[in-house]
């Protein structure tokens, strides 16, 4: 699978641009603040219909514009797909596949699979659990049909429950008012947790393998932290997890009323990372933490290829400058030439041969 071309209109500092890409390696070079990361963000937006930098859609609009759209022609085996994602300032989003309108986010996420590695991802180990949940959710939404929709429903219900809990500061909330929300959160939460556990079983193997190469035989392990031990939940069905989660939520009602927020569920879970059986977050050096982050991203790449039978597109956004020469060399040696890769950098690299693009002032020129 590869992205043949991209059309960007009114996205960030790109007013109107059509770019043809190489099926293998694309080097995006230029000074800072010219639009290199914006270009990769547009590619990722076509894949995920959201910014991997965590900003809102209206912040992606070109100055004084009322809409933006991103279009791309995607080659998947012998099939060519035309994808289009757009946004209007009023909040309306447009999703199209081969010019056919789609009504749900879940209908387009997963069609164009990307793996993104940005400087933020180098903080996967040392920062809080939100980044690690995002890492899991982003890849699983692309891997599993329906997961994205389940996650959207869960977050919507969670928001409604939290609104009710906040009302407890102004009036007495009966337990019976909270129970229906807990029932729905338990049902959807159990599906999310079970899927995460399933994907983690395979992700562990790939991550450990990649990390051994990067770190010269250090042992990497991953553990899912939830309301029950991972080993116990691995033996449980979705229905059993749902029942157990509902009972725990029921026992947390008093605590949640005081906190005015839901304190338990997959939105609070974490992915713990260990090197040689020690917490990487607490004991690993900065270099070791970066090696862990690289291993996780390469594992995501390998898992996507195994699950979907096709290679995703890899986006490396300004990560090379964050790595020492040894880790740069290891990362590049682990990349497969038959995976379309985009690399942004402030300077041209003599150690890489690929199609070179120069970005200046929101314009992309082929060198």
Image: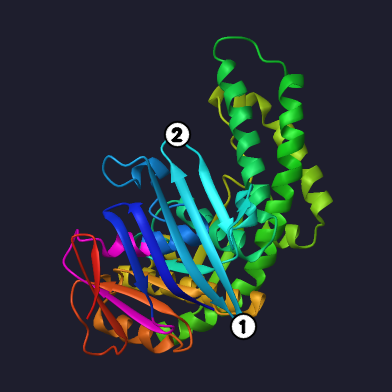
Give the residue number, with chain letter if any, for mark 1. 78
Q: Secondary structure at mark 2?
A: loop
Q: Residue at x 47, y 71 (%)?
A: 297
Q: Quadrant of the N terminus?
A: bottom right
Q: Residue at x 61, y 52 (%)?
A: 101
Vertical arrangement, residue 319 with respect to residue 333, above or below: above
Q: Residue at x 76, y 43 (%)?
A: 187
The one nearer the camera, 86 or 124, is 86
In the image, residue 163 lies at what x, y percent? 58, 24
Counting residues from the start of the chain, the first of labels 2 and 1 encountered is 1
Give the residue number, with chain letter if any, for mark 2. 90
Question: Coloring scheme of the render?
Answer: rainbow
Horizontal relation, residue 29 to residue 25: left or right: left
Which residues, given as a range, are shown in magenta? 22-40
The one nearer the camera, 136 or 49, is 49
The answer to whether residue 278 shows anywhere in this view is: no
């Amino acid at each position: 699978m590869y992205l043949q071309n991209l059309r960007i209109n009114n996205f960030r500092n790109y007013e109107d641009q059509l770019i043809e890409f190489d099926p293998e390696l694309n080097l995006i070079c230029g000074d800072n603040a010219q639009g290199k990361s914006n270009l990769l963000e547009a590619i990722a937006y076509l894949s995920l219909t959201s910014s991997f930098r965590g900003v809102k859609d209206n912040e992606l609009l070109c100055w004084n514009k009322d809409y933006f759209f991103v279009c791309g022609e995607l080659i998947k085996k012998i099939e060519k797909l035309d994808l289009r994602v757009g946004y209007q300032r009023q909040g309306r989003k447009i999703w199209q596949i081969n010019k056919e309108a789609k009504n749900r986010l879940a209908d387009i996420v997963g069609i164009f699979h990307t793996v993104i590695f940005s400087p933020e991802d180098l903080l996967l180990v040392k920062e809080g659990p939100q980044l690690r949940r995002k890492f899991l959710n982003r890849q699983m939404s692309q891997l599993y049909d329906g997961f994205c929709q389940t996650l959207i429903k869960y977050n919507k219900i969670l928001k409604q429950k939290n609104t009710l809990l906040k009302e407890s500061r102004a009036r007495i909330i009966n337990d019976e008012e909270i129970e229906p929300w807990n029932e729905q959160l338990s049902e959807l939460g159990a599906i999310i947790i079970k899927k995460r556990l399933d994907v983690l079983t395979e992700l562990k193997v790939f991550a450990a393998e990649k990390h051994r190469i990067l770190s010269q035989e250090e042992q990497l392990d991953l553990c899912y932290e939830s309301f029950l031990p991972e080993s116990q939940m691995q033996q449980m069905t979705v229905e059993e997890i749902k029942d157990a989660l509902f009972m725990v939520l029921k026992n947390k009602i008093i605590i949640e009323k005081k906190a005015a927020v839901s304190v338990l569920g997959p939105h609070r879970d974490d992915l713990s990372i260990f090197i040689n059986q020690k917490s990487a977050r607490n004991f690993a050096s900065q270099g070791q933490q970066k090696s862990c982050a690289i291993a996780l991203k390469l594992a995501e790449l390998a898992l996507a290829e195994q699950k979907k039978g096709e290679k995703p597109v890899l986006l490396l956004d300004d990560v090379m400058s964050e790595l020492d020469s040894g880790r740069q060399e290891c990362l590049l040696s682990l990349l497969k030439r038959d995976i379309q890769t985009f690399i942004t950098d402030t300077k041209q690299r003599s150690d890489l041969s690929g199609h070179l693009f120069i970005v200046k002032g929101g314009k992309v020129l082929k060198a």
